Image (spheres, helix red, strand yellow):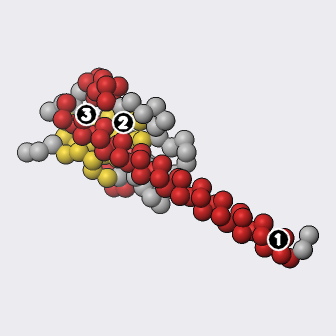
Amino acid sequence: MSDQDIKNIAANIRRLNAAWDRRLAERRTRAQEIGKSVAEAIGTDDADIRRIWGFGSTWETWRNYRTDSDIDLGIEGGDWSRAMSCLFRVHTDRDYEVSLVPLDEQPLSFSEAAKKHGVILYEKKQ
C-alpha cells in the first residue's frame, strides 16, 4: 500500500467521523428540544411541580452522547403518576426515550449532582 493510499484512507475516515459527529450533535439538539417541550407540558399540567431539570448526557455536554442516550428529566414536587400520564400523552417521538426521575425521592447525592450539572427546563412561577 502506498503512502498516497494511506493518506486517502485517513482522509476518508476523518470525513466519516466528522459526519458521524454532526449526526450525533443534531440528535442531541433534537433530544434537548423534546426534553424542553415535555418538561413544559408536565410542569404546566401539574401546579405542584416546582422544577424540572434536564440532566445526563443529553444536557451535560462534557459527557459522551450516544445514539441510545435517553432524555433524563428530574422532577421536584408534583404527582408522579400525573407526570407519567402527561408524558405518555405529549411525547410521541419513539426514537427518543424519556426517563422521569422524582428527585425528591432520590439519595441526596444523586439529586444534588443532577441539579449541579443539569439545566432547569421548567420552574413554577411564583
Q: Is residue 100 visible?
A: yes
Foreground mark, 2 or 3? 3
Q: Position of residue 93 (x, y in %)?
A: 42, 33
Give the residue number, with chain letter if any, for mark 2. 101
Mark 3, secondary structure of its residue: helix
Front position in the image: 34 or 63? 34
Do we see residue 80 in this rendering? no
- For marks 1 and 2, give the CA distance: 49 Å
Q: Say what secondary structure mark 2 lies in.
A: strand
Q: Residue, x 42% and y 55% (percent of image)?
A: 60
In space, the residues marked 3 and 1 are separated at their CA atoms by: 53 Å
The quarter of the displayed image where residue 9 is located: bottom right
Image disc number at residue 42: 3
Q: Disc 2 marks which amino acid?
A: Val
x, y (%) of residue 61?
45, 58
How far apart, in angstroms, are the residues tagged by discs 2 and 3?
Answer: 13 Å
Give the foreground label among 3 and 1. Answer: 1
Question: Is tag 3's residue or tag 1's residue first in the polypeptide sequence?
Answer: 1
Residue type, numbered disc 3 = Ile
**On-image quarter of the N terminus:** bottom right
Q: Could you tell me which quadrant the C terminus lies in?
A: top left
Where is mark 1, residue-wise?
6
The residue type indicated by label 1 comes to Ile
- Residue 35 left/right relative to 6: left
Q: Is residue 82 above or below residue 17?
A: above
- Choose between 44 and 50: the one closer to the eye: 44
Crowd around label 1: few <14 · some 14–19 · many ≥20 (10 Å): few
